[in-house]
Amino acid sequence: MPIARSIIRRVILALAAPILSAAFVGAVAPNATEPTKPSFESLAGQLLIASPDMRDPRFDHAVILVVRHDRGGALGVVINMPAGERSLGELLAAIGDKRTDAAAKVPVFVGGPVEPDMALVVHSAEYRCPGTLDIDGHVALSTSPQILRDIAGKAGPKQSLFAFGYAGWGAGQLDGEMAHNVWFTAPEDPKLVFDAERDKVWDLAMARRTRDL
């Protein structure tokens, strides 16, 4: 997979968060190249649904919320790979907040293979904190530690999904994978992102796909 840093730098600036630049790791698509068509259609705010023939085990039956997609690359968060639970107190301790009244446990997810120690929160769009990135008016993304404090203080978003790591693609890489039929697409739906049982998300997203292979 190619090394691409420009897209993450732009997202870092947008989020105003201390995220380190990193290599982007997309799904396996042999000879994937950027399409030569002059037009460009962003997939930001869409769901990527791994095809049944996905050859990369990291994305087997993955459903990814696309956070950003432009000519410089793309970034997304896998929403259907649970990784257990952690207490809010444990998450707060990781950012230096020693609050002892945050014993509630929250599900956490594997958001992707890039920066697996970095926490991201996909959440309903009514909530904002410094650096929150609106995705499509319905869901947003925050990486600021403030969102953890607000959730612990009952002032956070109505709905949220905690993920560690993300999926990313360099310039033209996702476009090439789409050309090689690696992914289906479907409109983002908050019910799929936050409410549906995780082991059913892939099937439900497949039923709503708008792009067939």
Image (spheres, grey):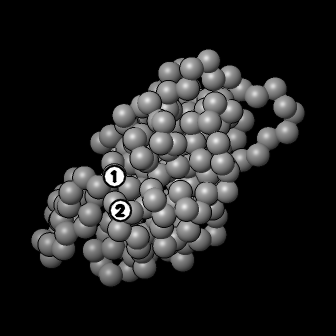
Q: Residue at x 71, y 47 (%)?
A: 42
Q: Earlier in the sequence, mark 2 or mark 1?
A: 1
Amino acid type shown at disc 1: Met
Residue that mark 1 sits on: 81
Residue 155: percent from left, percent from top: 38, 80
Q: CA distance from mark 2 to mark 1?
A: 7 Å
Estimate how packed mark 1 is, as few (under 14), some (14 to 19) or many (20 or more) residues with alpha carbons within 10 Å. many
Crowding around mark 2 (Cα neighbors within 10 Å: few <14, some 14 to 19, many 20+) is: some
Which residue is situated farthest in the right direction here?
Answer: 38
For this rendering, which residue is in front, 85 or 187? Answer: 187
Which element type, helix, strand or loop, lies under badge 2? helix
Residue at 29% of width from left, 55% of height from top?
Answer: 82
Position above or below: 18 against 197: above
- Would you identify the image quadrant in which residue 11 lies? top right
In contact (CB < 8 Å): disc 2 and disc 1: yes
Give me the disc on residue 198.
2
Q: Is residue 94 above or below residue 208?
A: above
Residue 47, x across and y down, in percent: 56, 55
Q: Classify the position of the C terminus by image quarter.
A: top right
- Residue at horizontal 61%, vertical 51%? 185
| Amino acid type, mark 2 | Arg
Residue in the foreground of this view, choosing between 70 and 57:
57
Query: In the image, residue 51 lies at what x, y percent?
Result: 52, 42
Q: Is residue 20 visible?
A: no
Query: Is 34 in front, or is 136?
Result: 34
Left of 145 or right of it: where is 127? Answer: right
